[in-house]
Image (cartoon, rainbow, N blue to C red):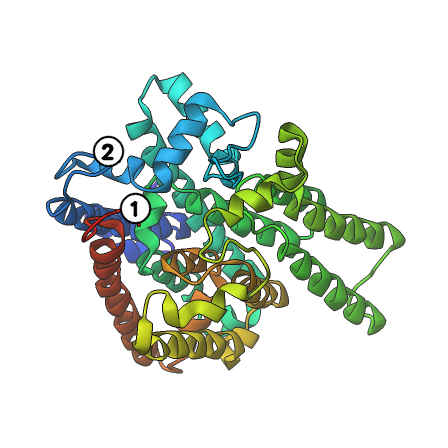
Amino acid sequence: MSEVATDGHPLTAARRLDPRTWPWWGQTLGVYAASRLFAAVVFLWVAGYQKANVWTQAHPSYFPWVSLMFDGSWYKKIALYGYPSTIPLDAHGNVQQNAWAFFPLYPALARGVMTVTRLPWEVAAPLLSTVLAGGAMLLIHRGIAEGAPRAVGRWPGLPLATVALVCAFPTSPVLQTAYTESLALLLVAGALLAVVRRRYAWAGLVIVLLGLSRAVALPMAAVVVVHAGVRWWDARRGRDELRPRTVGALALLTAVAVASGFLWPAICGWVTGDPSAYLRTQESWRGLHSVQPFIGWTYVPQFWFHASWPLVVVPAVAFTLAVVLAPSAFRLGRELHAWGAAYVVYIAGVVEPGSSLARFLLLAFPLGAATAGAVGRTRRGRAAWLAFVVLLMLGLQVLWVRQIWLFNPQGDWPP
């Protein structure tokens, strides 16, 4: 019996090579693999300009460069030695930068891979991240396909287009480095898909894991509240059934999401004996040594951009708001739209403005669907818009690796 492609026609040898005949998961992984190859080439090119530093030798090869730079060395230290039992202080009693700022699930998984495969951190961690991000792309595709029926009905290719935009996002090279973006993206996409499918027990488990991966579990509570509100509204109009058991499950899931947002700080305080250990550790990385909401934005003019900061910050904020409030965003399912909006507001409140902010936006993948679906009612118009955005993002991706990942500071460092 001959194989049949997705269009119903028999598969010949030539048609097997045509991505249009591949199943959805094959197309998704094909886009992802091509994007990782592109990013790897960019990494290798830029590595030629890297000088010796505290993390790597000059002109490092691929695996050391993507596994040891910046936070990668912190995660390696955690994977090998764990966390300190107390918060380290300097001679003046100020908290020093330490491992408690970094969440435990990713280094624990990497340590497991190292144990099973006998691979060193420099190889195991990037491979783990790359595999996790591949799984995230599959969940993103399913999340858009099932969670945004109105938008997908308007454009059936939207799930794959969203994957393409996430893969091309300027900071997406981090998905193959020893950072937690891959794991967090996998868990965020999994939690949203579980909520959309009304698998609340699975959603709760994934959100707890998210709380041990990154400080992003708290806005997931907003998604659950919006989901519950939509179900209540539909039940009042006879389009859904909301039993007491379901109400209890949704209430419990909301509580789990809120609790998961404070899980790691609580563990940190319990182990070190200092209830404020996590916040004090975070302060050691901040320019104002404060973690008050939105306070970091008060010194943007003195941070990166000096007198030209409005030329960067204002358009970036305006573009983000436009994407969140665009008609294409409202065509997404309520859960996907709620995550995009709640997460953007959340990171604006808790994250210091800097190079990491663009990296954190990777987790707001529903905004990629809103961007992809923003222009073009015709097939040709959608294709042209998608190609333009992808090419623009790939160019910015090269710029991000060249300007941010490359570390050749001028003058004395650290300051």
Q: Position of residue 394 (x, y in %)?
A: 24, 62
Type of amino acid at the residue the image marks with label 1: Pro
Q: Nearer the viewer, residue 410 or 323?
A: 410
Q: Position of residue 384 (x, y in %)?
A: 27, 76
Q: Nearer the viewer, residue 176 or 154?
A: 176
- Seen in the picture, residue 381 relative to 171 is either above or below; the reply is below
Name the N-terminal-most of marks 1 and 2.
2
Q: Position of residue 151 (x, y in %)?
A: 51, 72
- Residue shown at 59%/65% (left/top)? 342
- Residue shown at 68%/31% (left/top)? 270
Residue with the most extreme front position: 92
- Seen in the picture, residue 357 relative to 316 is either above or below; the reply is above
From the viewer's perspective, is the residue at label 1 or at label 2 nearer? 1
Q: Position of residue 88 (x, y in %)?
A: 51, 32
Proximity of marks 1 and 2: CB atoms separated by less than 8 Å: no
Label 2 crowd bin: few (<14), some (14–19), many (20+), radius 10 Å: some
Type of amino acid at the residue the image marks with label 2: Pro
The answer to whether residue 7 shows anywhere in this view is: no
Q: Nearer the viewer, residue 50 or 38?
A: 50
- Residue shown at 76%/66% (left/top)? 229
Circle 2 residue:
64
Label 1 crowd bin: few (<14), some (14–19), many (20+), radius 10 Å: few
Give the SS element for disc 2. Answer: helix
Circle 1 residue:
414
